[in-house]
Image: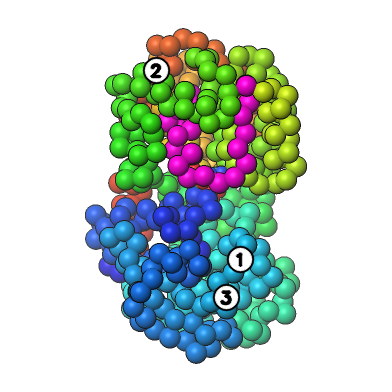
Amino acid sequence: MKVLSVASEAFPLVKTGGLADVVGALPAALAPHGVQTTTLIPGYPVVGKAVKGAKVVRRWPDLMDSEARLLSARIGEHPLLVLDAPALFARTGGLYGHADDWRRFAALAKAAADVAEDFDLLHAHDWQAALAPAYLRYGGGTARSVTTVHNIAFQGQFGADIFPELGLPDAAWGIDGVEYYGGVGFLKAGLESADAITTVSPTYAAEIRENRFGMGLEGLIEARVSRVHGIVNGIDPAVWNPETDAALPQRYTARALGRRRANKRAVEKMFGLEAGDGPLFTVISRLTWQKGMDVLVHCLDELVARGGRLALLGSGDAPLEQAFLTASQRHAGRIGVRIGYDEPLSHLLQGGADAILIPSRFEPCGLTQLYGLAYGCVPVVARTGGLADTVIDANEAALAAGVATGFQHGEVSYHSLSHAIARTVRAYSRPDLWCTIQRNGMRADFSWNESGRRYADLYKSLIA
Ligand code: ADP
Ligand code: GLC
């Protein structure tokens, strides 16, 4: 079975978040199940550099008003296609947020639909790729299609004025097509047009049927619910494994957790923290409302008063960045903050901190709690989406059954999060208990085995 996986980012070539990790891991996750995955991503400058000298396999003289070429390369051991269209993708600044994003990602989607004739199935990830199933549907393509929602908060909504430029037939302008609240909705179009919809955890698949989480698309999800599947993300053991991780000063296993101490010392040094054996929390996150970071800001005095310390790595909303920096000045030596994006440092934090805080208001899957589990960095999470599905709260029943892997809290509020922090600090003060929770997490299975099989089964059912 040949699948074309289309996305706006893929680790290790280009990454701004969890989407890249998942798109980068899928080819290896699917291969054991008889699926050969080819990944298609835009030719941003960083990607172009990485695939220098790649073969040109197709040309478009006029793809959404730009000249474009398709380059054939490899991502790890797997086939990669790069849409080389400098007018669209050779930009300075971020990957997203350009005035003509609609044109850039319509081009990606159109190219994908053109190329899909060589594949059994096209798998589109998030809004940037989601117009591809619509191009397939209205262009009479034969490949089956899947749209995966990694985050329904990002929908790719644009004005009606762009519709004539998309090159879709008039029939596509309708409630069951690309039209969305009077404009064009890229994600909406992909959800209407694909043969199946997936999202990245079973709980999020249920949540997006409700208006609290569906962000306006709950009606569509409900209407197509028999085609909606929640498949939880796995982690790539070649990238995230404390036994082999080159970013760690000291590697370790579940049997030798004492070795984490050297990593903790390294974290303290990097973040200007007092050295100590008390509980060291970390945050590795976009600093946004989704991630509950505004609530965490209010809990910091309490975290410190309870004897905790915090090493935070993140970037995002300017007021939140400022609030964490201010707290780090107020609590010098107890709170250390790095504003920015740093892949190796994120590994060190997982390998050296004791617990990772993830108080998200919604979380389709979340990967940092999975990395935390694998690294013995105990996750403290809000009970939502994939966080609810992957972390087992250390309540009495779970402890007695020997399955607890972290701490959950209900609402994302000052009281609820403070309480979770207090529970975590208490558990940390009992070394045997803490070590059991760490080991339970490290021994849990977050590989792609089961989820890879579920995607493959879904693909097969669509092609049959
Ligand atoms: P989301 O994709 O919603 O941001 P996920 O938890 O799914 O959340 O994925 C986030 C990914 O980005 C993880 O791989 C995490 O380690 C990484 N990450 C987030 N912020 C940073 C940062 N400042 N530096 C390095 N890696 C980061
Ligand atoms: C999105 C979600 C996150 C998920 C990631 C990968 O960025 O916000 O929860 O883990 O996609 O699927």
- The residues colored magenta run 333-361
Q: What SS does tag 2 mark? A: helix
Q: Is residue 335 visible?
A: yes
For the residue carrying disc 2, how many other residues have a C-alpha within 10 Å: few (<14), some (14-19), or many (20+)?
Answer: some
- Picture quarter with the N terminus: bottom left
Q: Check mark 3 vs ligand 2: CB closer than 8 Å? yes or no.
A: no
Residue at image point 27% right, 58% down: 31
* Mark 1 CB lies closer than 8 A to ligand 1: no
Residue 435 — which label? 2
Please identify the quadrant where the C terminus is shown: bottom left
Disc 1 target residue: 92
Tell me the amino acid under the disc marked 3: Leu
* Residue 359 on the magenta segment: yes
Q: In this view, does 123 lie above or below 360?
A: below
Q: In this view, does 307 lie to the left or right of 123?
A: right
**Badge 1 density bin: few <14, some 14–19, many ≥20, Cα 10 Å:** few
Residue at 72 percent across and 73 percent down: it is: 159
Q: Does the magenta stretch include residue 41?
A: no
Q: Nearer the viewer, mark 3 or mark 2?
A: 3
Q: Looking at this view, name the residue that lies furthest to the bottom.
A: 61
**Mark 2 and mark 1: span between their CA atoms?**
46 Å
Name the residue that disc number 3 marks: 88
